[in-house]
Image (tube, grey):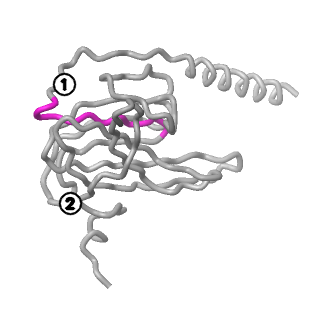
Amino acid sequence: MKHSKDVRFAAALFYMCLALAGCASTETSTSPFDPAHQARIRVYLGTSAYLILGDVCDGQAHPNIHAAAGGFSYFTPNKTLGMPLPADMPGSHYREYAVPADQIMTIKLYWQLQSGNGAWEHCGPIYQMFTPQPGADYETYMKFEHGICQGLELHRLTKTIEGKVISEFPPLNSLPFRRCATRYETK
């Protein structure tokens, strides 16, 4: 009987923390953004995310930004650089970063969850390479439909003359891949 109460208490505490995380504030960065030499990227939280400043498959070490730490990221406030918000935002928890423009960047996303029966479900790691353009705004996230992972999404955000923010697919340096060797294999 005591075990049952402990489990209910732990579950209630977890859901209360999750609800409070939804009230996370937004933190505006005072870091300068230079649109002539940088682009901005918004990373939606919930997956483990890395922004690798270079081609992850070239055998070189590259600086990287650990942009999100899975579900625990929900407990941190949003970090914004002033990017426009599209009407079809896939989530409300995010972080925005200024990254070098005109240089290849690799996005790495990974998601995992332990189900009630103890089995681990996961998606990824999935990599995507692209070259951010100066002054451009991008967003990335792991897309799910009906609880099934659909892979990494990357969009470029633009404003119409009417001021509406639209998202479109940017030019890519590669198709999404799970490991570097698969990028070069042909069949």
Q: Would you name the residue on which mark 1 appears?
A: 33
Q: Which mark is residue 144?
A: none
The residue that appears at 28% across and 42% down in the rendered structure is 51
The residue that appears at 26% across and 36% down in the rendered structure is 65
Horizontal arrangement in the rendering, residue 19 relative to residue 176 (left or right): right
* Residue located farthest toward the bottom when viewing the structure as drawn: 187
Q: CA distance from mark 1 to mark 2?
A: 28 Å
Q: Where is residue 128 drawn, in percent x and y?
A: 31, 55
Q: Would you name the residue on which mark 2 appears?
A: 57
Query: Front-most of 90 and 86?
Result: 86
Q: Where is residue 102 drawn, in percent x and y?
A: 13, 46
Residue 95 forms part of the magenta stretch: no
Q: Helix or strand or loop: what does disc 1 sit on?
A: loop
Query: Front-most of 2 and 48?
Result: 48
Residue 42 forms part of the magenta stretch: yes
The residue that appears at 19% across and 24% down in the rendered structure is 33
Q: Which residues are magenta?
A: 35-46
Horizontal arrangement in the rendering, residue 92 relative to residue 181 (left or right): right
Q: Helix or strand or loop: what does disc 2 sit on?
A: loop
Q: Where is residue 21 drawn, in percent x and y?
A: 55, 21
In the rendered image of this protein, does residue 78 appear above or below residue 38? above
| Mark 1 vs 2: CB contact within 8 A | no
